[in-house]
Amino acid sequence: MSVLGMGCCWRCWGERGVGHNCQRGITSFLKCDHHPGPWAHTGSQGNIRYMQEIPFCLRVEHLLHYSMSDSNKTDFTNPSTFILLGIPGLEAAHAWISIPFCTIYVIAVLGNFTILFIVKREPSLHGPMFYFLCMLAVTDLVLSTSTLPKMLSIFWFNSREIDFSACLTQMYFIHCFSVVGSGIFVAMAFDRYVAICHPLRHSTILTNTVVAKIGLAVLLRGCILILPYPFMARQWPYCRTNIVPHTYCEHIAVVKLACTDIHVSSYYGLSMAFLLTGLDVFFITLSYTQILRAIFSLSRKDARLKTFGTCGSHLCVILASYIPALFSFLTHRFGHNVPLYFHILMANMYLLVPPILNPIIYGVRTKQIRDRVLGLFTHKVT
């Protein structure tokens, strides 16, 4: 059984399509009469082998629009592993791409752990805004840790294989905590609205109990609504190929490989994206509209500028989270002319950028946390 599940090598597949004469081995495609150059086997499991050389001409359509024989369909249904290609078309640059990716991951981990440490250490920071900030830090750590280590193993060691169950687990954590992060943005916008528009009632409205209930509701919303993703993905038969043209197991990228009608998965994912994102963006917009009205009603110009600057930076982080996510989601369904490598890079941005921006914008720019961090380093120097 071949991982490719095709009748030719990758290069012929991209240049000539199927239907020409290629020589097949028993367990894998070892040689093609059009491109007889050496094929470097980069991994194996049982009788499954795959090739290292992936041409730049690879496209999603090549992976999907091919009808196999019934015997191959029977043998290939429900593979034990998937193969993540990384960024198709930029394989030669994987080592260079890994440098900013690794840097982002290290900074994100250090930044978010610093916020958690500072808030836990300082009793004066035990308030609603900082509790929500800690929830966001945990979400960022889960998102980045669910994706970056595997990406780096692809870039550095060409370790492309991922177990089918591990792939579904990664899919669930990515989408679940993306929804959780979106819900936390709504909670933080509501906290800022109460703090600026109703400062005298802030402590009575957002008590510790209310904050805990909001956090639990946001977590349960993400866990429950995303739960059908892996369950539906597990039930589909995968008889075309087990090669995912992505750096991680994104929901639609995986289910598109199924050789059956996936409209249920597609429509459910589409409805969740528009419903959840639409509602969250609506409430965030509503909160910040009220905040801006309150800002412009302030008599002191310096107070207006300071508050406006803080809210503006918050909105930039929110936009940096939503725009790449929506672009990636819509490109899967409608952006057939978008280059695959550009789509994959944008899909990575909404998982990589927020975890590094959130500690900077919500943490370093927050005076209380900035003072504690500087005091920590000053104390060590002294």
Image (cartoon, grey):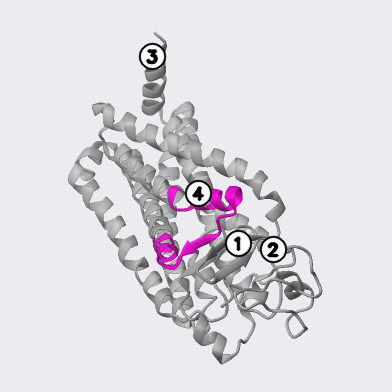
Q: Are there few (<14), some (14-19), or many (20+) residues within 10 Å of tag 1?
A: many
Of 356 and 215, nearer the camera is 356
* Secondary structure under the numbered disc 4 in the rendered image: helix
Type of amino acid under label 3: Lys
Of the numbered discs 4 and 3, the one sitting upstream in the chain is: 4
Q: CA distance from mark 4 to mark 3?
A: 32 Å
Of the numbered discs 1 and 2, the one sitting upstream in the chain is: 2
Q: CA distance from mark 1 to mark 3?
A: 45 Å
Is residue 166 in the magenta section?
yes
Query: Mark 1 near mark 2, Cβ–Cβ under 8 Å?
Result: yes
Of the numbered discs 2 and 4, the one sitting upstream in the chain is: 2
**Number of numbered tags placed on the structure image:** 4
Q: Are there few (<14), some (14-19), or many (20+) residues within 10 Å of tag 4?
A: many
Identify the mark at residue 85; answer none if there is no mark: 1
* Secondary structure under the numbered disc 2 in the rendered image: loop
Identify the mark at residue 380; answer none if there is no mark: 3
* Secondary structure under the numbered disc 1 in the rendered image: loop
Horizontally, is 181 left or right of 31 in the view? left
The spot of residue 168 in percent (x, y) is 42, 66
Type of amino acid under label 2: Ile
Say if 65 sits above or below 336 in the image: below
Of the numbered discs 1 and 4, the one sitting upstream in the chain is: 1
Range of the magenta residues?
A: 145-172
The spot of residue 308 in percent (x, y) is 48, 37
* Secondary structure under the numbered disc 3 in the rendered image: helix
Is residue 232 in the magenta section?
no
Name of the residue lying farthest toward the right:
34
Q: Read off the residue under disc 4.
A: 148
Type of amino acid under label 1: Leu
Say if 336 sits above or below 197 in the image: below
* Mark in the foreground, 2 or 3: 2
